[in-house]
Amino acid sequence: MTTYFPEVEQITFEGRDSDNPLSFKWYEKDRLVAGTSMADHLRFAVAYWHTMKNQGADPFGEATMDRLWSDFSEPLDRARATCDAAFEFVSKLGVHYYCFHDRDLAPEGDSFAESCKNLEIMVDHAKMLQESTGIKLLWGTANLFSHPRYVHGAGTNPDYHVFAYAAAQVKQALDATKELGGENYVFWGGREGYETLLNTRLKQEQEQMAAFFRMCVEYAERIGFTGQFLIEPKPKEPTKHQYDFDSATILNFLRSHGLIDHFKLNIEANHATLAGHTFEHELAVAAAAGKLGSMDVNRGDLLLGWDTDQFPTDLYATVYAMLEVLAAGGLGSGGMNFDAKVRRGSFEPVDLFHAHIGGMDAFARGLIVASAIIEDGFLEDFKKLRYSSWDGAGAAALAGNSSLDECERFIRAHGEPEVVSGRQEYLENLINNFI
Ligand code: XUL
Ligand code: CO
């Protein structure tokens, strides 16, 4: 069998003293952290589109990536080679999951029927490789944004014909995800947004989106797809105003349209920062609603205002993220998908390994540190004290059993409150002790 990464052997844990760059320094899959293995806490997944398909083209220049598996003129030959390379990569990396868009796995055909056929062929191929390697599908999704037909959106398109096309495409993608045992299905609203209100009925487009989701829920129930539905927030790019701006916006949308019970959220780090939030804020908002489903782990660049999708290497970011994930009780059927791409100048196949190893080690370390912080208890103790009045005088108000009159009585009896420091710097210093 052809090997696409001949220079790379199985990546293993060697510890921080190893000088082998193709080894894990922190990620030790079977190591127990708070009673659960690292692999089960982190549930890493490789993103098929960035890792296998990204050629490195940008608006100023063409492809740079050295990718043997793309050197086939027939689209299906290329798709098979790409799939073989993907499973070799994921196996050698020691990751248990991958994620794809329908059009990453199988090429778009000249007709809808041909696209469906291509997907069927590639699902068979991927299924065979899943069975022989033990690698599983974390989630599938449909690409409803690349083809020109989706220029004005998919579910939110002003033309029902395009809406129906998108729905028919999702039907196929759901079948594919079910066939491959996908544990989740993601909806990222690619071009579900608008550029100008001059040509847009905002309220109707949101109602169309709700109708679209309702049809997906109904279909999944009918075919017995039991994976979790996830919506992935993103505030802008490609459109200026995206309907799925952030966690809070999506939660409101789901509640308004009676869809809240059927979805959780897939939170992406770089999308959070584009929305003007931190990653941990978005995780906390989702978790507070019981809707933290999965994560797309990457990072942006604060000097650039777009979705740079870099690999996550910032230890503060991983520690703060893992504090939220652990507090939420983990990701359930979700995981951590590396929705990240190597820079255009990192064009050798081995760079894909360096990138993923770095991201996995950064999250493994984030997990270890966050778990130690939680075990120490200083943050929880601090918060307990900070909110202690709500266990006493405030308990009735919190339970909804107080009134403005009662508050007035309280103030007349107790006078001016004593204002207490929030001790942010003190707490930040303690966090540094753990890193
Ligand atoms: C785009 C993005 C997507 C979704 C899946 O910014 O994050 O790749 O994760 O469609
Ligand atoms: Co993403």
Image (cartoon, rainbow, N blue to C red):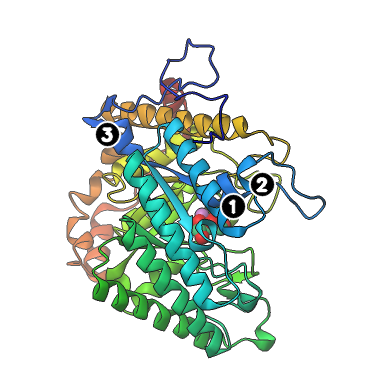
Asked whether the viewer can see residue 16, the reply is yes
Horizontal side, residue 173 vs residue 178: left or right = right
How many neighbours does mark 2 have within 10 angstroms: few (below 14), some (14-19), or many (20 or more)? few
What type is the residue that disc 1 sits on? Answer: Arg
Q: Nearer the viewer, residue 408 or 421?
A: 421
Distance from the alpha carbon under mark 2 to that under mark 1 = 7 Å
What type is the residue that disc 2 sits on? Answer: Asp
The residue wearing badge 3 is: 381
Asked whether the viewer can see residue 335, the reply is no
The residue wearing badge 1 is: 78
Q: x and y percent of residue 13 in the render?
A: 41, 20
What type is the residue that disc 3 sits on? Answer: Asp
**For numbered disc 3, what is the local secondary structure?**
helix
> Is the residue under label 1 in contact with that under label 2 (CB below 8 Å)?
yes
Label 2 CB sits under 8 Å from any ligand 1 atom = no
Question: Which quadrant of the figure has residue 236?
Answer: bottom right
Q: x and y percent of residue 297 in the render?
A: 48, 44
**For numbered disc 2, what is the local secondary structure?**
loop
The residue wearing badge 2 is: 71
Task: Please say if 234 is above or below 64.
Answer: below
Task: Please say if 238 is above or below 51.
Answer: below
The image's mark for residue 262 is none
